[in-house]
Amino acid sequence: MGLSQQNRLRDIKRFSSHDSIFLVRYSAAYKVIHMSDSDTLDLFEHQAKKATAGQRPLADRMRPTRLDDFIGQEHAVGKGTLIRNAIEQDRIFSMILWGPPGTGKTTLAQIIAQHTKCYFVQFSAVLSGVKDIRQVIDTAKDQRNLHRKRTILFVDEIHRFNKAQQDAFL
């Protein structure tokens, strides 16, 4: 085994220590594929994301990532409920999560994204325009046609859509 192959194996071992990351040889560069969110990152992007992980707000770092760690809303996501069964069986349906701030709407959406085989897109109705909505729709079509993946679209602050955004969305 040549030195180049040994270096590649060392890199593969280092990056595969996290069970949801796989290295794939693509053209002349390695790509890191996160299976949980299907994003493809090159090695530099992966290192940058890893370096900034500790700089995220504490609330974001402490956010639960599994349904078993999700506290509250037992009537909605407790064992045997419709939403929990849909997540566990990867049979997600359209939902509107409504409630005051801090009740777990965004957290639940992120848990759904991590536990399903769907492509997940999150954006804010406050910060996004019609162009962004059209881009998300095009991306969802590409995911369905090219990768046979359904798309979960999480729109934060959906009640703030203006008339033009509503029309583009429909």
Image (spheres, rainbow, N blue to C red):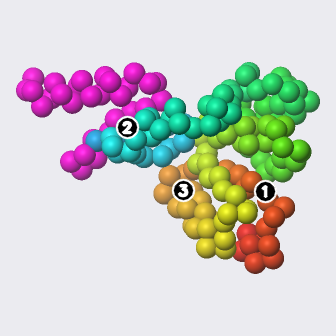
Which residue reaches farthest right? 75
Q: Secondary structure at mark 1?
A: loop
Question: Who's the residue at 85% across and 27% down the image?
Answer: 72
Q: Amino acid at mark 2?
A: Gln
The residue carrying mark 2 is 47
Residue 74 sits in quarter: top right
Q: Position of residue 150 (x, y in %)?
A: 62, 51
The residue carrying mark 1 is 157
- As drawn, the label of residue 143 is 3
Q: CA distance from mark 2 to mark 3?
A: 26 Å
Q: Position of residue 140 (x, y in %)?
A: 59, 59
Look at discs 2 and 3 and give the one toward the viewer. 2
Q: Amino acid at mark 3?
A: Gln
The foreground one among 73 and 56 is 56
Q: Which residues are magenta?
A: 1-29
- Residue 97 in magenta? no
Q: Secondary structure at mark 3?
A: helix
39 sits to left or right of 134? left
Closer to the chain start, of discs 1 and 2, is 2
Look at discs 1 and 3 and give the one toward the viewer. 1
Q: Position of residue 134 (x, y in %)?
A: 62, 71
The foreground one among 72 and 82 is 72
Q: Secondary structure at mark 2?
A: helix
